[in-house]
Image (cartoon, helix red, strand yellow):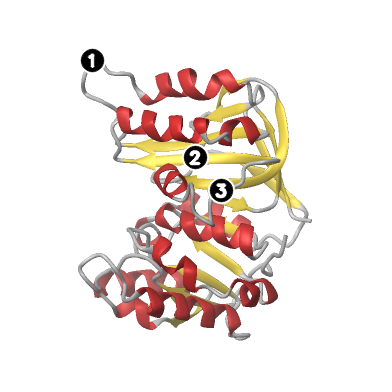
Amino acid sequence: MNKGKALKKGAKIGLTAPAGPTDEDKLNKGITILRKLGFYVEIGLTCYQNEGGYLAGSANLRANELNQMFANPDIDAIFCLRGGYGAMQILPFLNFELIAAQPKMLIGYSDITALHIALQQKSALATIHGPMPASDLISASDFTLQALLSVITNAHLGGRIENPPGKIMECLVPGNAEGILTGGNLALITSLLGTPFEINTKGKILFLEEIGEEPYRIDRMLTQLALAGKFADAEGILLGSWTGCQSSDPKSFQVRDLFRRIIAPFGKPTLMNIRAGHCEPTVTLPFGIPAILQAEEGKLFYFNP
């Protein structure tokens, strides 16, 4: 797997909006945070675009800007400005060979899941599931900032992913698993099924998270992944934050009921309550590199070969 270099103080960050737009105030606050973390920032034109109310410019503009940032030798890593919607649209226009030849970290989550999966599978690029400047970093806790920095500045052999204090990783299915860490937002993963960018979970530890979906919709998406063989193929499973996914109906299944009914029967070592995704504070996950899951002990390690 290709990896971008670990970042140091003074590294140059390319800031781009491959999905949704933001307003000027949030953009400026995001830039300020990146600078306070010790980075120089090159701001892409997409960061100032708003097309149709939910896109940061045309698909061609967003894809070309991302291609150019990978090609630019002066840019050390790329932060996605925010999620929203639109990253899937740019996949046909990305230059995966160029990206493979110019590996660098790409950081984001939520809608950016489409880029994580595509770049891992088409460019053999390790990517970072982490907070974004205009939607997370402007109000991030010290834990969130340090968790991010511990991954993107790590030039050593690896580390342990640990929850915020008081938040316990919980065992759903006992056992140990080793595999490449992959995954992201459940809705994006299911939306990519049947496309050239469908997720491959063979030999992988699959991470899933979601926000604002009723349990019956979570049921439908998890069942779709089950029918597609994605849980059967995986070595292990990590379940992140499920913010706003609880039902107020006392007769309804809740999200954890669905985990027990749909995921647990596959018998794959599974950890719940990984505080990653649409939550604050949040951990940062290094995708595309080897990880070890120890479910009974509630531990997750990654390696930086």
Quarter the C terminus occupies:
bottom right
Question: According to the image, label 2 marks what residue?
Answer: 208
Name the residue type under label 2: Leu
Q: Is mark 1 on a helix, strand or loop?
A: loop
Q: Which of marks 2 and 3 is in front?
A: 3
The answer to which of 205 and 60 lies nearer the viewer is 60
Q: Position of residue 227 (x, y in %)?
A: 50, 31
Q: Which mark is residue 199?
A: 3
Q: Residue at x 49, y 35 (%)?
A: 225
Q: Residue at x 69, y 23 (%)?
A: 175
Q: Nearer the viewer, mark 1 or mark 3?
A: 3
**Dot 3 crowding, Cα within 10 Å, few <14, some 14–19, many 20+:** many
Q: What element carries label 2?
A: strand
Q: What element carries label 3?
A: loop
Quarter the N terminus occupies:
bottom right
Can residue 169 be seen here? The reply is no
Q: How far apart are marks 1 and 3 (CA)?
A: 34 Å
Locate residue 176 relative to residue 74 in the image: left or right: right
